[in-house]
Amino acid sequence: MKKKNILFITGQFLPFTKSIGGIIRILSFCNSLEKKFNINIVSTGNQYFGYFGFKKKIKSYNLINVKKKFFFFLFNFWIF
């Protein structure tokens, strides 16, 4: 059976965040969904902080980094 795609849109994600607290919540949610879905994550960030030991775990996710936060404003406009 072919996996469906799921898209997460978040302001921050690895490796472009200093804070790991909110990221762990997203990782746990993705972990519970990864058997049934292909995980795609869109986030913002310019400064590299590292993977905090999670690089191997997120290897199977499709990470998309948007350097300008203005993108999210446009995306919000298109949805609503």
Image (cartoon, rainbow, N blue to C red):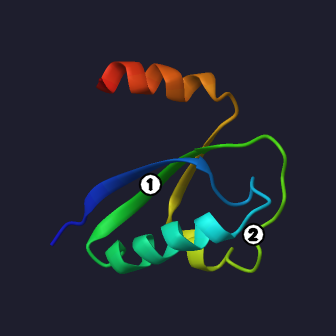
Which callout, 2 or 1, points at the residue further toward the start of the chain?
Answer: 1
How crowded pointer 2 is (Cα within 10 Å; few <14, some 14-19, many 20+) is rated as some
Residue 22 in which image quadrant: bottom right
Residue 19 in which image quadrant: bottom right
Q: Which quadrant of the figure contains the C terminus? A: top left
Outermost residue, left side: 1
Work out whether residue 20 or residue 55 is closer to the camera in this orientation and state it. 20
Give x and y (percent) for residue 53: 74, 80
Mark carried by residue 40: 1
Q: In the rendered structure, are the residues bearing label 2 and label 1 in contact, judged by CB atoms less than 8 Å apart?
A: no
Mark carried by residue 52: none
Compute the Cα span from label 2 to label 1.
17 Å
Give x and y (percent) for residue 75: 43, 26
The amino acid type of the residue labelled 2 equals Tyr
Secondary structure state at the residue bearing disc 2: loop
Q: Is residue 20 above or below residue 80?
A: below
Give x and y (percent) for residue 38: 36, 63
Query: Which residue is located at x 36 percent, y 79 percent?
Result: 32
Residue 13 falls left or right of residue 74: right
Which residue bears the numbered disc 2? 51
Query: Which residue is located at x 74 percent, y 59 percent?
Result: 15
Secondary structure state at the residue bearing disc 1: strand
The amino acid type of the residue labelled 1 equals Asn
Query: Which residue is located at x 52 percent, y 29 percent?
Result: 72
